[in-house]
Amino acid sequence: MKPWQFFRMCRLSSVFTILLFALFLLPLVGCSKRNFLVKVPSDDNIRGECVVLLHGLSRTYRSMNRMQGTLTDTGYHTVSLNYPSTKKTIESIAEEDFPPAVDKCREFSPAVIHFVTHSLGGIVVRQAFSKKRPLKLGRVVMLSPPNRGSDVSDKLKDWWFYIWLNGPAGMQLSTAVDSVPNQLGNVDYPVGIITGDRHAFFDAWFSFLIPGRDDGKVSVERAKVDGMRDFLVVHESHPFIMNSDYVMAETVHFLTHGNFKHKKDPALSQGAD
């Protein structure tokens, strides 16, 4: 095969993968005018604490439904924020959409307010906390956060389709030193990070673009942030990590104790690829 033929094949493959990803993603995204979804635990199972959940890029609060249900069943009041991740910059989301969810949590007069985020949601929290940290701040669990940017953004940031699909915030997630994630500095509040080391089938091309282990969107190394309290790698993919029973159990453990259990991942014990 001649070099130009190989290059053309790779380009076509990448276009096909992005289109496939978009077709798969659009039904997940849907549309909703709901600003946030609130769930209250049963009267005999109330912890007196509240959790704010933030979904990832190009998703909605629905992607956090299982996680929210688990947290509510565990005794937390929960507020799942539904924010326009593809319409605004990270700074605008943190300033305009994030505070109302925290205020809604305060209506329950919680002893502490925790946060559970997926992907971009973790960067929104870091951005918000860099300006004003909420009172009674508890712990933060970040799932697959691009804390040091994403190599996928580096490679595809100039593609019109990527720009259309991910919007202004997606353009701010590069690995450059002046990107938003890399300008936010260390964290000095309790943060536990869970990230994956496998990719979904429609993220195969994205995974190819990322050096080292990754979840199809973010490398394991770029999920880390200086100052984090604990770090856990699980055998899950970026789009679905929040639906793992193992991840949900580890999330609850960190919110309760400030660390992960680090038990063997069932996905690995089952011989999953």
Image: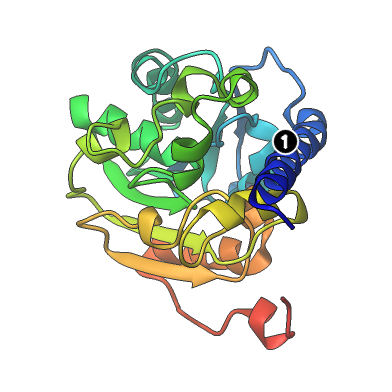
Q: Please state the horizontal and vertical placement of residue 186, each as a whole percent of the image.
A: 18, 48
Name the residue located 39 percent from the left edge and 27 percent from the top edge: 172
In the picture, the quarter occupied by the C terminus is bottom right
Q: Is residue 192 left or right of residue 200?
A: left
Judge whether residue 132 can be spotted in this image. no
Q: Is residue 81 left or right of residue 126?
A: right
Q: Is residue 52 above or below residue 83?
A: below
Q: Closer to the camera, 156 or 257?
A: 156
Q: Closer to the camera, 28 or 75?
A: 28
Q: Which residue is mark 1?
A: 15
Disc 1 residue type (three-letter): Val
Q: Please state the horizontal and vertical placement of residue 42, each as a whole percent of the image.
A: 64, 47
Q: Is residue 9 left or right of residue 229?
A: right
Q: Residues within 10 Å of mark 1 (few under 14, many from 20)?
A: some
Name the residue located 55 percent from the left edge and 36 percent from the top edge: 56
Q: Secondary structure at mark 1?
A: helix
Judge whether residue 240 can be spotted in this image. yes
Occupied quadrant, residue 179: top left
Name the residue located 48 percent from the left edge and 37 percent from the top edge: 153
Q: Please state the horizontal and vertical placement of residue 91, each as a whole percent of the image.
A: 33, 19
Q: Is residue 80 above or below residue 175?
A: above
Q: Please state the horizontal and vertical placement of residue 137, each as a whole percent of the image.
A: 28, 42
